[in-house]
Amino acid sequence: MTTLWIAGRPVSGAGTSDLVINPATEETVASVGSASLEQVDGAVRAARDATDRWRRTPAAERADLLHGIANWLREHADKLAWQMSVEGGKPLVENTDEVGWAAACFDYYAELGRHERGRVLPPVEDRQLALVIKEPLGVVAAIVPWNYPLLLLAWKLAPALAAGNTVVAKPSPYTPLSTLMLAEAFTQLPPGVVNLIAGGAAVGEALVVHPGTDLVAFTGSTAAGLRIGELCARQVKRTHLELGGKDAFIVCEDADLSVAAAGAAWAAYLNAGQVCTSAERFYVADAVYDEFVDRMVAEAAAVRLGSPLAPGTDMGPVIAEVQRAAVERQLASARGAGARILVGGDHGGFDRGWYLSPSVVVDVTDDMPLMRDETFGPVAPIARVSSLDEAIARANALPYGLGANVYTNRADYAYRCLDELKAGTVWINDPLTDNDAGPFGGMKASGNSRELGPEGLESFRETKHVHWSISAERKPWWYPYQ
Ligand code: NAD
């Protein structure tokens, strides 16, 4: 039976049950009891009770424990990846990678967390110590989506723990099983340091508004992020929001099109386009537009749609019927407004499973929802641009600012893009890679914080400034004034 993990013990969820459905077969995989309000409260209390011991655990000991979690993840990579493919529909190879990246994140923060905890300032007086001390915030509520369940949890959990916080984590109701399997890894930690609960938006909100949580670290849609931001503002509670995107992909006229089209296909179709940084709108220089489109059609047609568990599958189904329907609505609306779908956009011959074949769409305009709103599906709409000025202006025109891609070998073009694109990550000839040592996150409506790198640790720390005069002496500027 699938259980929650509260105060170092497995507990059956006493709230309503959520069915976990395999998106490739539409079969029910499990029924998971979500946390009742009392269990949410119990998890927050357990985390609160564990804060003092955990924040006082020497950082080198915490590092050992975090490396232990990384090791556990690697040892259980096959089982975890299989579970993620069954509940989430991502190909096994991608989920195996995901477990490895999650483990690497724990290793990275294990070391970063023991590197420093602030700085010493030159004091304003003699015989004074001026310290900037970094402290844990307390209890972190970590709420994550279904598209990269373990990786996005690791990006919060590892730095939060390394900084000395305790955590209550909630996965998406689409993909709770792989996350709840992590309970075994957390037996290495003192009870209450990590608590795992399950449930949907209502359980998430109970965590958000609970007076015992000090920071809400959320990855998900911009709509849910706005709601969480409003709820937290009422308590002046910190938020760490990683939200939606509509990433632009610019192809300059000098690009090597065989590489650019292959990179573009991967950027648009990876995980069936369900990556927050999926390339969702393409701006291609007029001179190479036709050839780029032809190459993209060939790339899309070559993607092997199939069972996430079968070797040789490039792309599985999308997460749910409602998600596929939303993508199909955008496609239909674009077609109704004059766009042409050159390839894909059908169910790929599958009559079971929420498959959607990768598509290439042309004759698109910026007012179409397909070019304006997040799609989160395997769709590559391609627009023609007459200059790099136009490409950058159109890329920057939306409220989103998560990532952006560029293909060019010209330094002047690359420089303009890295300087002018309003996005948290700019990938030049290197679509969609992450580096644990560097920050990830969005500008504008795509988020208010950064994960990974030293910035990702800083997001989970509070700052205290200490003035310490070594001996207590009367100060000359006190009363009475001269
Ligand atoms: P979602 O917003 O529906 O749900 C995300 C998580 O929040 C789930 O666990 C859900 O149960 C919970 N939740 C929903 N409403 C809530 C509320 N009012 N209070 C508390 N918790 C709530 O998103 P999703 O469909 O699971 O994921 C897809 C979205 O996530 C896309 O918009 C995508 O761009 C975004 N995303 C962003 C990043 C990033 O790093 N910026 C990464 C991955 C996904």
Image (cartoon, rainbow, N blue to C red):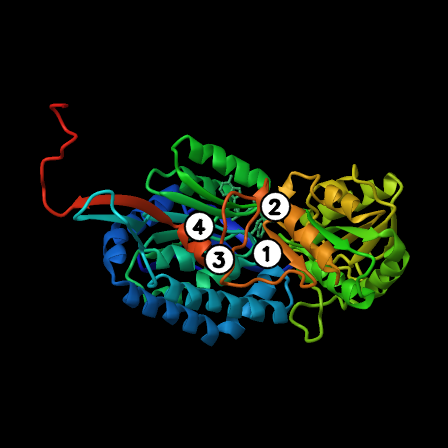
Amino acid type at image mark 1: Asn
Q: Residue 214's spot in the image, x, y percent?
A: 36, 43
Q: The N terminus lies in which quarter of the figure?
A: bottom left
What residue is drawn where x is 41% and y is 40%?
A: 238
Q: Is residue 477 above or below residue 466?
A: above
Q: Which type of secondary structure does the marked residue at label 2 adopt? A: loop
Cα distance, mark 1 to mark 4? 15 Å
Q: Using residue 140 as the reference point, say whether residue 359 is left or right of it.
A: right
- Are the residues at dot 1 and dot 4 in contact (C-beta closer than 8 Å)? no
Q: Residue 174's spot in the image, x, y percent?
A: 56, 53
Q: Residues within 10 Å of mark 4 (few under 14, many from 20)?
A: many
Per the image, the residue denoted by label 4 is: 142
Between circles 1 and 2, the one closer to the viewer is: 2
Cα distance, mark 2 to mark 3? 18 Å
Residue 452 image label? 3
Answer with mark 1 or mark 3, whichever residue precedes in sequence: 1
Q: Residues within 10 Å of mark 3 (few under 14, many from 20)?
A: many
Between circles 2 and 3, the one closer to the viewer is: 3
Answer with mark 4 or mark 2, whichever residue precedes in sequence: 4
Per the image, the residue denoted by label 1 is: 147
Cα distance, mark 1 to mark 2? 12 Å
Q: Which type of secondary structure does the marked residue at label 1 adopt? A: loop
